[in-house]
Image (tube, rainbow, N blue to C red):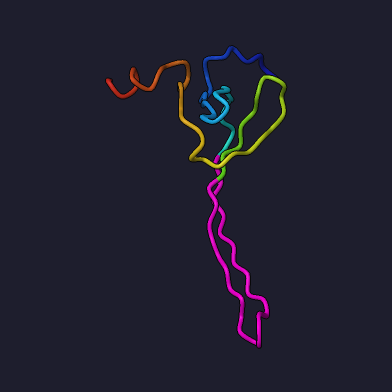
Amino acid sequence: MTAYDGDMATIVVHKPSEKNYVLINVGFGVWATDKPGFMGFADKDSGEVNRAFVCGGDGVIRHFPAGELAVVSVDGSSIDDLLSR
């Protein structure tokens, strides 16, 4: 195992809490249900989720809706620096 120097990561901010996290991965899922409803009519529901998995300074892996996060830096460079290249 090598030591982490802090420069090779994507740092994101969780907008509601304003806490920074290391981005681990992003996942997308689709779900659907089809269960019996009132008087034999099917009760159908479906949706999709886009979740981001992050890690805080305590090492705990958490997940948030991806829309609640914003990228702060990638590999030690700010987004403005990366986009101006």
Name the residue at 66% across, 17% down. 2
Q: Percent x, y for residue 9? A: 53, 23
Q: Is residue 1 left or right of residue 13?
A: right
Q: Nearer the viewer, residue 58 or 75?
A: 58
Q: Percent x, y for residue 23? A: 56, 30
Name, please, the residue furthest toward the left.
Answer: 84
Q: Main secondary structure of the magenta part?
A: strand
Q: Which residues are magenta?
A: 26-50
The count of marks equals 0
Name, please, the residue furthest toward the bottom.
Answer: 39
Assign the C terminus to one quadrant of the image.
top left
Name the residue at 53% across, 47% down. 50
Name the residue at 54% across, 41% down. 26
Q: Percent x, y for residue 53? A: 61, 37
Image height check: is 42 above or below 27?
A: below
Assign the N terminus to one quadrant of the image.
top right
Q: Is residue 2 left or right of residue 17?
A: right
Name the residue at 63% across, 38% down. 63
Image height check: is 6 above or below 51?
A: above
Q: Is residue 83 magenta?
A: no
The quarter holding residue 57 reads: top right
Q: Is residue 49 left or right of residue 59?
A: left
